[in-house]
Amino acid sequence: MTAIDVSVAPPPSRPRFWRVFLRQRSAVIGGAIVLIVAIVALLSPWLAPHPYDATDLVNVWAPPDSVNWLGTDKLGRDILSRLIVGARTSLVVALSVLAITFLFGVTLGMVAGYFGGRVEAAIMRTADVTLAFPEVVFAILIAAMLGPGVSTIIIALALVWWPGVARLARSLVIVQKEELYVDAAILAGASPWHILRVHLLPNIVAPLIVRASVGVGFIIMAEATLSFLGLGVQEPTPSWGGMIRDGLPALRTDPMLACAGSAVLGVTIIGFNLLGDGLRDALDPRLHRS
């Protein structure tokens, strides 16, 4: 995971942002990958050449041909169609987890950083308890207790990911609340909640955007891991992790299913990580790798 310096520079102008971003070849490649995945996910009902759940038991583990471009799986379902619809599954889970974690994580982190004292201690000790567990292991534990399903994945990953977001937001607010514009707002009679929402939040948004873009890659990987273990997305809904699991028994004789799922998953994660690095450098040149 990319480390983020909590010192925040003024937001860059739009021309400078695009100039710095487009200068980085890796960022452009990452952005292109993310854009393609997003378009495929959005248009998946129309792009998929066959219904993703249509079975053909006479045509199981078929090799690629003119009808099934990547072949079929153990139930005769078209692999390409399931890969395409699987992109939608991954992005729906990732965006849902991001929305929940940023709503609660950023709010709690900003409150902890601004008010301090017992409020900060209570919030951050709760976060520390969660962070004491390895992220994926903790998500597996929660999913095992709640049972498999898309909602289970979203809840499990949100519970795993909010503490890191809260700690980042807290650190950023601690730095920013010492700035003169906050003192001016206090002297003008602004309430703490007004200061948090109107003054502090816009000034810490750049590192949060970077965190979100990198976090999507982690969430997609974690969703695939849970689905691979049978704790995530259930049949017949396609998931890249589930496709890899289904393809392993036939890896030597029919490797297309496992290899295609692994390739798409890996490229997507790399794309989001490259995009996150590019956004970090473009939004604030002082946000460096550790």
Image: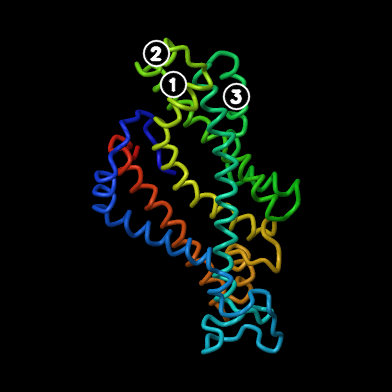
Front of the two marks 3 and 2: 2
Estimate the x, y position of residue 103 in percent, counting from the top left: 57, 37
Q: What residue type is labelled 2?
A: Asp
| Camera-side residue of 173 and 214 | 173
In the rendered view, tell whether residue 83 sits above or below residue 143.
Answer: below
Residue behind mark 3 = 123
Query: Any mark on residue 221, and which?
Result: none
Work out which quarter of the rendered image holds the C terminus and state it: top left
Estimate the x, y position of residue 113 in percent, counting from the top left: 50, 21
Q: Residue at image x 37%, y 53%?
A: 274
Q: What residue type is labelled 3?
A: Ile
The Cα atoms of the two marked residues, 3 and 1, are separated by 15 Å
User: Is disc 3 surrounded by few (<14), some (14 to 19) or many (20+) residues within 10 Å?
Assistant: many
Residue behind mark 1 = 174
The image quarter containing residue 72 is bottom right
Work out which quarter of the rendered image holds the N terminus and state it: top left
253 horizontally vs 189: left or right: right
Q: Residue at image x 60%, y 86%?
A: 62
- Per the image, label 1 sits on a secondary structure element best described as helix
| Camera-side residue of 159 and 104 | 104
Residue behind mark 2 = 183
| Camera-side residue of 77 and 2 | 77
Q: Residue at image x 51%, y 35%?
A: 165
The Cα atoms of the two marked residues, 1 and 2, are separated by 13 Å
Front of the two marks 1 and 2: 2
Q: Residue at image x 45%, y 30%?
A: 201
Labels 3 and 1: the sequence-earlier one: 3
In the rendered view, tell whether residue 219 sits above or below residue 41.
Answer: above
User: Is disc 2 surrounded by few (<14), some (14 to 19) or many (20+) residues within 10 Å?
Assistant: few
Residue farthest to the top? 187
